[in-house]
Image: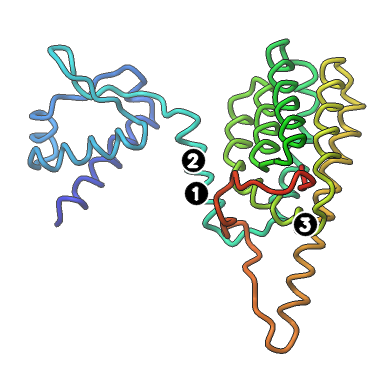
């Protein structure tokens, strides 16, 4: 059996101990020599397993007299990146991403209106200010819109919600690219709606915020659907060239590609 396969088995066993609660954050794993004896493997194999555990955010390696491998809770960033990879590499359409946003972003409005702090509200207004400045400079990277929606989710002060919305960042940007194709003149409207939403959140007006967010997202959903219907029509023509219609297709130049100031903001 290869070193890689044996190290995977060690990783699986340690991961199982963590999930069962036998190992908790802060606990130190046995020394390399003891792990070698316990699993009947070489130090090379043990070190490979520890490297994988560290890369997955399950342990941290410390050096020195009190060093070793210590169990740690994986960060939301690492977990979110894993979810983002699953979403981005799947055959998920921009329309499906937008429908998911409808469920998540409308559903969390009561929490945001109840829990948003002065710092949260100030951060959302600051993104609105940068968005307005970008439009005035004839620029509006769609990543700014995604940043606003991610920061909005963080205002729930619920780590699971924030992680889920963060994992949708790249797919969200790519779905907005599709919406921009259908209607390149709605960017300014989207930025204005972001600011109006912050106003409603600051006033703890969940009903008003819900109305604004529903209008905001429904317009994006209609534009995405229009763009994808256009793809269907093009591919149905004789000699038509099929265009990838999933969010796994990366826009040229990356998520922060600059578009016209009138670009869609969702």
Quarter the N terminus occupies: bottom left
Of discs 3 and 1, which sits in the foreground? 3
Quarter the C terminus occupies: top right
In the rendered image, residue 19, in percent from the top left (x then y), is placed at 40, 32
- Near-viewer residue (186 or 11): 186
Of discs 3 and 2, which sits in the foreground? 3
Q: CA distance from mark 3 to mark 1?
A: 22 Å
The residue that mark 1 highlights is 85
- Mark 2 element type: helix
In the rendered image, residue 235, in percent from the top left (x then y), is placed at 71, 79
Q: CA distance from mark 3 to mark 2?
A: 24 Å
Question: In terms of sequence position, does the residue under pointer 3 or pointer 2 come before the other?
Answer: 2
- Near-viewer residue (178 or 53): 178
Q: How is the image coloured?
A: rainbow
The residue at 87%/22% (across/down) is 200
In the rendered image, residue 92, in percent from the top left (x then y), is placed at 63, 58
The residue at 24%/20% (across/down) is 28
The residue that mark 2 highlights is 81
Residue 49 left/right relative to 196: left
Q: Residue furthest bottom?
A: 238
Q: Are circles 3 and 2 on residues that touch, CB within 8 Å?
A: no
């Amino acid at each position: 059996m290869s070193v890689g396969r044996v190290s995977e088995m060690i990783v699986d066993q340690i991961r199982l101990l963590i999930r069962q609660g036998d190992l908790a954050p802060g606990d130190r794993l046995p020394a390399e020599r003891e792990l070698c004896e316990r699993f009947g493997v070489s130090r090379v194999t043990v070190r490979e397993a520890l490297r994988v555990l560290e890369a997955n955010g399950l342990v941290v390696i410390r050096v020195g007299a009190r060093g070793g491998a210590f169990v740690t809770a994986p960060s939301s960033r690492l977990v979110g990146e894993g979810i983002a990879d699953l979403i981005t590499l799947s055959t998920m359409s921009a329309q499906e991403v937008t429908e998911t946003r409808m469920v998540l972003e409308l559903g969390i409005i009561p929490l945001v209106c109840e829990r948003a702090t002065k710092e949260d509200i100030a951060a959302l207004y600051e993104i609105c200010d940068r968005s307005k400045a970008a439009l005035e400079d004839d620029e509006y990277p769609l990543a700014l819109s995604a940043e606003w929606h991610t920061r909005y989710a963080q205002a729930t002060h619920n780590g699971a919600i924030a992680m889920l919305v963060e994992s949708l960042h790249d797919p969200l940007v790519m779905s907005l690219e599709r919406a921009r194709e259908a209607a390149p003149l709605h960017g300014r409207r989207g930025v204005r709606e972001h600011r109006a939403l912050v106003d409603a959140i600051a006033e703890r007006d969940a009903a008003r915020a819900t109305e604004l967010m529903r209008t905001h997202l429904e317009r994006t959903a209609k534009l995405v659907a229009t763009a994808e219907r256009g793809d269907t029509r093009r591919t149905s023509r004789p000699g038509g060239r099929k265009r990838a219609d999933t969010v796994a297709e990366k826009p040229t130049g990356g998520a922060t590609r600059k578009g016209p100031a009138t670009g869609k903001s969702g």
